[in-house]
Image (spheres, rainbow, N blue to C red):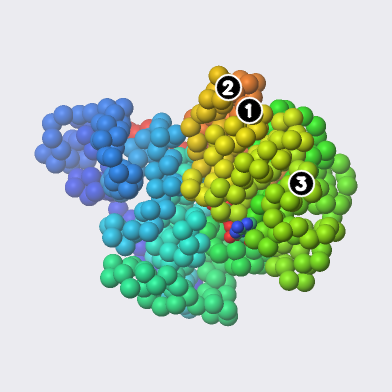
Amino acid sequence: TEDQLVTPWTYSVASGYSLLRDPQYNKGLAFTEKERDAHYLRGLLPPATASQQLQERKLMNTIRQYQVPLQKYMALTELQERNERLFYKLLIDNVEELLPIVYTPTVGEACQKFGSIFRRPQGLYISLKEKGKVLEVLKNWPERTVQVIVVTDGERILGLGDLGCQGMGIPVGKLALYTALGGVRPSACLPVTIDVGTNNEQLLEDEFYIGLRQKRTRGKEYEDLLQEFMSAVKQNYGEKVIVQFEDFANHNAFELLSRYRTSHLVFNDDIQGTASVVLAGVVAALKLIGGSMSEHRFLFLGAGEAGTGIAELIALEISKKTKVPVEETRKKIWLVDSKGLIVSSRKDSLQHFKQPWAHEHEPVKDLLDAVKAIKPTVLIGSSGVGRTFTKEVIEAVSSFNEKPLILALSNPTSQSECTAEEAYTYSEGRAIFASGSPFDPVEYNGKVFIPGQSNNAYIFPGFGLGLVISGAIRVHDDMLLAASEALAGLVSEENFAQGLIYPPLSNIRKISAQIAANVAAKAYDLGVATRLPRPENLLKYAESCMYSPIYRNYR
Ligand code: NAD
């Protein structure tokens, strides 16, 4: 019981040498003369003092000198461990430049080499060795108030497959974005990796591998560990802690989400976050391609976590708008997987998450024939397989659409279904295009086209902030719709004029606050918010709750 399992906590005021070694409070050369006197820092620092701005300039200079992205990643990790506020100041002020470092694609490489670059642990490792002791492990974490947990079991890290325990880079990176983009306090964020082994032979043989050296455990033992973790989380942190599942293989991802969505505050970014960000893009794109959602036909290549998640949210949005049952609105959406168009004759052999999409149609073997048969107005790639939107496919979809909407979501860049240049060229400059990985602007027939990036980072930080500020205890699909609406509403006329269907990422803190306000409002409307009374102006309230990386003065 709780009484028998106590951890002996001590609290003390950091000063002198220990203050300089405490990333939460360290300011390096930015300690003022007065602070140096008051906190026993005299002589421990060189005489010069520096402003936070000067420190930021110096570090950005250093980071820009590194040619190899992984070196930049390591420099940022070191900074995070040395001076947390400065780390977040850099990230917030240089979001477009640093996002590809702390997040996809560089974080993927960092995970692959995590064992070699590992210095200090930055989160909780819960392995099969901790079975039966997970609650105690949680109590070892130094922070008492945790609001967001990002957890992975490392089985499907980005498009890189099973990286086992080294998947920890993903929760760490995602939570850095929770703080930088969404304003959740760093101390309230907890990265967790559940280590049940790995089937990655290379890692199992790597002498620097940091995880359990065994094949992945499946079945009951896996489920029991997850169950113990989920119970311990609720017991230790209460009802209002967000558990974000990240980069689980799809057989576990759908299962975990459906098992815990009624008892915990859970969110799966690969399924739900992706769906929300893509829906926002589609809603915004209507201004350019015309018509209402219900008048469009959607065809997906790829029917996994991303594809079926997006499809379901689009169906739900059409259903809400038209009052037509979701079973009917799904019929506007078609998916192609590796075996061809998903149709009713395949139903019995389909995984359960594909079954709702098995509509009446004769079998169609490949994408091009499916495009010709379905005549979609919106073509979405979520297959993880590059160069599948061929010239013929794009020409076909452009032959019956004035402005086809083409979303090539697969990451990394090499897996993108087509490049921006291909989309604009083969559609003769008519396609509205966005992709998962960024592409440079393209010039076609004298006109410059700026491709948008359909990036999950638009949604999950603000979504999480909305849950936190309202004290929500469950995630409801309507909140995802609310987040999409907020994001779509922030695309300006100027953005549209450039062919963009997302606002610029440089405004992300404002975007997150707006999304948070919309999500929180929905949580109150649905009766799942516990922070009472409801703030009168949720947008102002969200902004006021956001973490600022500016140094504080010490007494
Ligand atoms: P997943 O493994 O769950 O699903 C992949 C799907 O593609 C499966 O249905 C599979 O049958 C299908 N598929 C595989 N090869 C195919 C082929 N040759 N032809 C047709 N279908 C094929 O993976 P996921 O989580 O859905 O991710 C898929 C891709 O989407 C990844 O590349 C991922 O990086 C990307 N993604 C992008 C975003 C984003 O940009 N915002 C978000 C999430 C996922």
Please tell me which residue is depicted at 41% across the width and 50% down the height of the picture. Answer: 107
What mark, if any, has residue 460 been given in the picture?
A: none
First in sequence: mark 1 vs mark 2: 1
* Image marks 1 and 3: residues in contact by CB distance under 8 Å: no
Residue topped by disc 2: 445
Out of 24 and 248, give the one closest to the viewer. Answer: 248
* Callout 3: CB less than 8 Å from ligand 1: no
Please tell me which residue is depicted at 76% across the width and 43% down the height of the picture. Answer: 376
User: Picture quarter containing residue 72?
Assistant: top left
> Image check: 467 left or right of 16?
right
First in sequence: mark 1 vs mark 3: 3
Local packing at callout 3 (Cα closer than 10 Å; few below 14, some 14-19, many 20+) is: some
The CA span between labels 1 and 3 is 21 Å
Residue at the right extreme, as displayed: 324
- x then y, percent, for residue 446: 55, 19
What mark, if any, has residue 372 been given in the picture?
A: 3
The CA span between labels 1 and 2 is 8 Å
Residue at the front extreme, as displayed: 392
Task: Name which residue type carries label 1.
Answer: Gly
Task: Name which residue type carries label 3.
Answer: Lys
Ligand 1 visible in quadrant: bottom right
* Image marks 1 and 2: residues in contact by CB distance under 8 Å: yes
Out of 324 and 53, give the one closest to the viewer. Answer: 324
> Image check: 26 left or right of 343?
left
The CA span between labels 3 and 2 is 27 Å
Residue topped by disc 1: 429
User: Picture quarter containing residue 524?
Assistant: top right
- x then y, percent, for residue 57: 29, 29
- x then y, percent, for residue 459: 59, 42
